[in-house]
Image: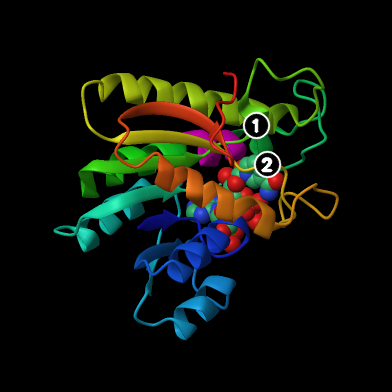
Amino acid sequence: MLVVGATRGLGLAVVEEYVGRGAHVVATERSDGPSGLRTLAERHREAVEVERLDVTRPEQVAALRERLRGRTFDLLLVVAGISLAPQEAVGVDIATDDFTRMMETNVLGVMRTVEGLDGLVAADGTVAVMSSGQGSVANNTSGGFEVYRATKAALNQMVRSYAVRQAGGSRSILLLAPGWVRTDMGGSGATLEVSESIPPLVDTIEAQRGRPGLRFLDRHGDDVPW
Ligand SMILES: NC(=O)c1ccc[n+]([C@@H]2O[C@H](COP(=O)([O-])OP(=O)(O)OC[C@H]3O[C@@H](n4cnc5c(N)ncnc54)[C@H](OP(=O)(O)O)[C@@H]3O)[C@@H](O)[C@H]2O)c1
């Protein structure tokens, strides 16, 4: 497994879950220093390798691809994402810099990572991206989190275009909605503990193994409306 954006939150939980299931995981941090990932890697030296990647730095994507050249992964999962100024309405309050950084990280950075690293994935492996239920245009009846939603909707659209280019291939391509989870991003008011989201989400990723094509799925494996 290759998991991008794994220092804390959902990415770290995915790595822990896979290690608990006996997998070997290469997991990335964007800067060095203490983190949950570092602690996990020290506890499981055989099972966890830590690599460096900031998804907004294309030269780091290329460098990671070079360092991993010759290896093959069953799964590439890109979890990295940010939510800045979540309550601000677009066009009213949002700082241009916050808007740009969110789009750069959640859309451009994630897609550059997918396109830059997918050559390391087995021909019948899985390319998965952490989207969000908030990326569903059809389900947006409550509003709020306007820019964050827009980044995930744009990401979904980008992954659909990517999947069209992969048509006829054997890979499973997944957009994942983990639910609203208590992490630094999700906040303390979120409805789910990490332990309620990630084990079923990993079950869903594994259930899709060997099923080619694109799906937008929640943690239980149910389709999310686009
Ligand atoms: N929590 C939820 O309720 C929820 C719901 C739906 C979807 N999601 C999505 O799930 C993903 C993880 O969310 P989370 O709740 O775990 O958030 P989080 O606790 O804030 O963790 C975000 C992770 O992304 C990494 N990251 C941020 N910018 C990066 C960059 N430029 N390059 C590489 N890594 C970067 C962070 O690394 P650092 O430690 O270096 O900052 C951290 O590991 C995000 O894509 C989020 O949109 C979350």
Q: Which mark is residue 179?
A: 2
- 55 magenta-colored: no
Mark 1 lies on residue = 133
Query: Residue shown at 65%/37% (left/top)?
Result: 97
User: Which mark sits nearer the N-terminus, 1 or 2?
Assistant: 1
Q: Secondary structure at mark 2?
A: loop
Image quarter hosting the N terminus: bottom left
Image quarter hosting the C terminus: top right
- 105 magenta-colored: yes
Whether ligand 1 has any atom under 8 Å from the Cβ at mark 1 is answered as yes
Picture layout, residue 71 above or below residue 35: above
Main secondary structure of the magenta stretch: helix
- Say what amino acid the circle numbered 1 marks: Gly
- Residues drawn in magenta: 101-107
Residue 79 visible (yes or no): no
Instruction: Name the spot of residue 78 as percent of width and height, x first.
Output: 45, 47
Identity of the residue furthest to the left in this view: 70
Q: Are marks 1 and 2 in contact (CB under 8 Å)?
A: yes
Classify residue 167 by image quadrant.
top left
Query: Residue shown at 27%/35% (left/top)?
Result: 171
Mark 1 burial class by Cα count in 10 Å: few <14, some 14-19, many 20+: many
Whether ligand 1 has any atom under 8 Å from the Cβ at mark 2 is answered as yes
Taking depth in this image into account, of 198 and 36 the one nearest to the observer is 198
Give left or right: position of 148 versus 38. right
Query: Residue shown at 48%/21% (left/top)?
Result: 157
- Say what amino acid the circle numbered 2 marks: Gly
Mark 2 burial class by Cα count in 10 Å: few <14, some 14-19, many 20+: many
Instruction: Name the spot of residue 149 as percent of width and height, x first.
Output: 67, 29
Picture layout, residue 164 above or below residue 80: above
Taking depth in this image into account, of 218 and 162 the one nearest to the observer is 218
